[in-house]
Amino acid sequence: MNESIFILKGNLVFSRSVEELEIREHSYLVCKDGLVEGIYETLPFEYGGYPVTDYGDSLIIPGLVDLHVHAPQYSYRGLGMDMELLEWLETNTFPEEAKFRDLEYARQAYSIFVENLKKSATTRACIFATVHRKGTLLLMDLLEESGLCTMVGKVNMDRNCPDYLRETDAEESATETVEWIKDVLHKKYQHTKPILTPRFTPSCTDELMEKLKMIQMRYELPLQSHLSENQSEIAWVKELCPWSEFYGDAYDKFGLFGVDCPTVMAHCVYSDERETARMKENGVFVAHCPESNMNLASGVAPVRKFLDEGVHVGLGSDVAGGSTESIFTAMSHAIQASKLRWRLFDDSLKPLTVEEVFYMATKGGGEFFGKVGSFEPGYELDAIVLDDTRLMHPQPLDVKKRLERLIYFSDDREIMAKYAAGVQIF
Ligand code: GUN
Ligand code: FE
């Protein structure tokens, strides 16, 4: 018998599109060679004899995708939120990230991060490490062991940060990056991939950006960074790159904005018509990080506009701008933030719905990883099983309403089982 087939049974919920939530109650999800083979109300004869795990009345949904999180910042999540971005980086972020030169500290801190990410609903994540090559590799070792599917970046910074963290020059930053990539290739990880990570335009000289493009082409790597998060940051980019038409153009001029370079940009709170059009044209993904945008008083991104324009959008926790790795929390924050934006600022962009944030947290962000984030045939099987019996209620609730409550107030206690790329994590 072919051992690579297994079957999960429960209330299956997944997105077909941004508007369409599909609910298949008490159905069988057949997984073959790590991929979804099909969904059935009655198990077809040919699958008789393969193992079935019956999760009863639990909900089974695609694993959640965190398109933007900083692993070294997990140590101070929930602390020091009384500043805006640039002051926050200098005061909280850079001193903490400097500690990751020490591999013992890095092991201790990253172990806590990975342990908690493993317990969470997240199966996929795009992760920033620090500038340190060895520490980044250590984080990747821990993630590989966890079974999660991640893209991890050694951060590049050769200007505008304290001496104790800055890489000497573009040359050193590029050399360290290539050494790190070679180390990663040597490790032959199964589900932990490298992603180029220029921190943001203010931290990277033009010379470094040019070198990163060469590296990007040589090793065919994707890229993650920050974009249009805060108004002082945007003004600074205009000063640093007077030749750029808008912030995103400062990446695009170096070939680091989507075209031939799968790219995810965090925030995009102030992306205007031109920047949005360029993201659409180049296939850039937006990582919407609502909690971070509230904590650092950055603002609220025009997510409905991105969705209407057909820009790829996923959700990010952006720890430690965000306080939690929970993408369920990011979903509810995305809805709440969109309501405030609509009420207080721009009533032309209607608030986000449960269907829309669920899509962003699964299939929307999942697309950055390929066919990920849905239970349609051919998708990689990422799934979490949610038992909501602890969240008691006196009235009958349908599956859609149960999902809504899980989004607003479940925590890791509801997660009974987790699968990433067809492998059971717990
Ligand atoms: N922009 C540059 N670096 C960072 C960071 O660490 N967090 C956030 N939220 N924005 C950034
Ligand atoms: Fe960030």
Image (spheres, rainbow, N blue to C red):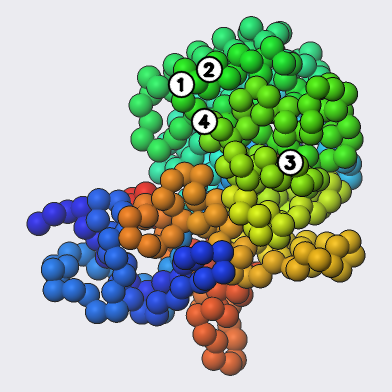
When asked about the image quadrant of residue 282, the answer is top right
Label 3 to label 1: alpha-carbon separation: 27 Å
Q: State how many labels appear.
A: 4
Query: Visible in this render: residue 339?
Result: yes
Q: Secondary structure at mark 4?
A: loop
Disc 4 to disc 1: CB gap under 8 Å: no
Where 149 sits versus 24, above or below? above
Labels 3 and 1: the sequence-earlier one: 1
Labels 4 and 1: the sequence-earlier one: 1
Label 2 to label 3: alpha-carbon separation: 25 Å
Q: Secondary structure at mark 3?
A: helix
Label 1 to label 2: alpha-carbon separation: 6 Å
Which residue bears the numbered disc 3?
275
The kind of residue on which mark 2 rests is: Ile
Label 3 to label 4: alpha-carbon separation: 18 Å
* Mark drawn on residue 260: 4
Label 4 to label 2: alpha-carbon separation: 13 Å
Disc 2 to disc 3: CB gap under 8 Å: no
